[in-house]
């Protein structure tokens, strides 16, 4: 393994540790401040997404950007559904 | 009653078998198909006067599905990709700077939007921004 590759591997490992530290910090913050589980899952999910980008290599950023944008759009669609009464838009 | 239960059981087993088989052979396309089905379901179950709302979100989801297809390196087991489409796909994948740096740059405003809407605060945004910058440098 060349010196450049060695440096890259160390940098990649540092990113993984940073992601782990950020997730730990988010969990501790949620416990101390009493944040909801929904908020915590969004926070940790965004950090895990960074790990997935690093793991996936060159295609990772595009794939996971698309994934996050899709989830954001789905969340927007679901959040803005209005019903005149609960469940009225679902015929089931 | 027993015949009805048995018939339903056979139908359910058949559907499960078809689903498993399709997921093994064409997982990517089946997943895309499910996303489109959910999207169609969400649109159809909206009241008529609200169907034009959020059209940009529907368009973005479809665009994301299509863009993800172009960076997918796997091939279909059953279908031949058209030559011009395969060429476009290989060109897209060869533009390494475009498919790595541009989405990382676009992640920043998207994460800001999510942090803002969820009320996650500046600390979370700067944590995400720091990690994105680290991946950018990597």
Image (tube, grey):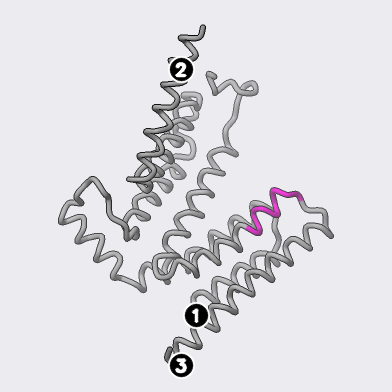
**Whole-number angstrom distance, CA of label 2 to CA of label 1:** 56 Å
- Residue A74 drawn above or below residue B118: above
Instruction: Name the residue that disc number 2 marks.
Output: B8
Query: Of the residues tagged 1 and 3, which is closer to the observer?
Result: 3
Tell me the residue at 50%/88% (across/down).
A7
- Residue B126 drawn above or below residue B27: below
- Residue B87 drawn above or below residue A35: below
Tell me the residue at 17%/51% (across/down).
B82
Crowd class of label 3 (few under 14; some 14 to 19; many from 20; radius 10 Å): few
- Specify the farthest residue to the right: A32
Tell me the residue at 57%/33% (across/down).
A81
**Whole-number angstrom distance, CA of label 3 to CA of label 2:** 63 Å
Q: Are marks 2 and 1 on the same chain?
A: yes
Q: Secondary structure at mark 2?
A: helix
- Specify the farthest residue to the top: B1
The region drawn magenta spans A36-44
Query: Of the residues tagged 2 and 1, which is closer to the observer?
Result: 2
* Location of the C terminus of chain A (image quadrant): top right
| Magenta region, main secondary structure | helix
Q: B93 or B18, which is in the foreground?
A: B18
Query: Can you give x and y, in whole percent of width and height, for residue B98 in the image?
Result: 36, 69
Give the number of the disc on residue B137.
Answer: 1
Instruction: Name the residue that disc number 3 marks.
Output: A3
| The quarter of the displayed image where residue A85 is located | top right
């Amino acid at each position: 393994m060349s010196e450049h590759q060695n440096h890259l591997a160390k940098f990649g490992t540092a990113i993984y540790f940073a992601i782990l530290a950020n997730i730990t910090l988010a969990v501790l913050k949620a416990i101390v401040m009493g944040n909801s589980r929904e908020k915590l899952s969004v926070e940790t999910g965004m950090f895990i997404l960074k790990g997935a980008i690093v793991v996936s290599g060159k295609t990772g950023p595009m794939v996971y950007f698309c994934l996050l944008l899709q989830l954001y759009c789905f969340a927007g669609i679901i959040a803005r559904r209005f019903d005149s009464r609960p469940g009225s838009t679902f015929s089931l | 009653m027993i015949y009805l239960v048995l018939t339903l059981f056979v139908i359910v087993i058949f559907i499960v078998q078809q689903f498993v088989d399709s997921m093994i052979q064409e997982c990517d396309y089946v997943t895309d198909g499910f996303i489109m089905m959910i999207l169609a379901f969400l649109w159809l179950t909206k009241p008529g006067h609200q169907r034009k709302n959020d059209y940009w979100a529907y368009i973005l989801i479809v665009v994301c599905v299509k863009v993800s297809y172009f960076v997918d390196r796997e091939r279909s087991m059953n279908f031949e990709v058209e030559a011009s489409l395969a060429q476009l796909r290989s060109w897209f994948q060869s533009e390494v700077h475009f498919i790595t740096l541009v989405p990382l740059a676009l992640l920043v405003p998207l994460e800001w939007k999510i942090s803002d809407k969820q009320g996650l605060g500046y600390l979370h945004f700067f944590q995400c921004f720091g990690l994105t910058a680290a991946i950018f440098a990597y």
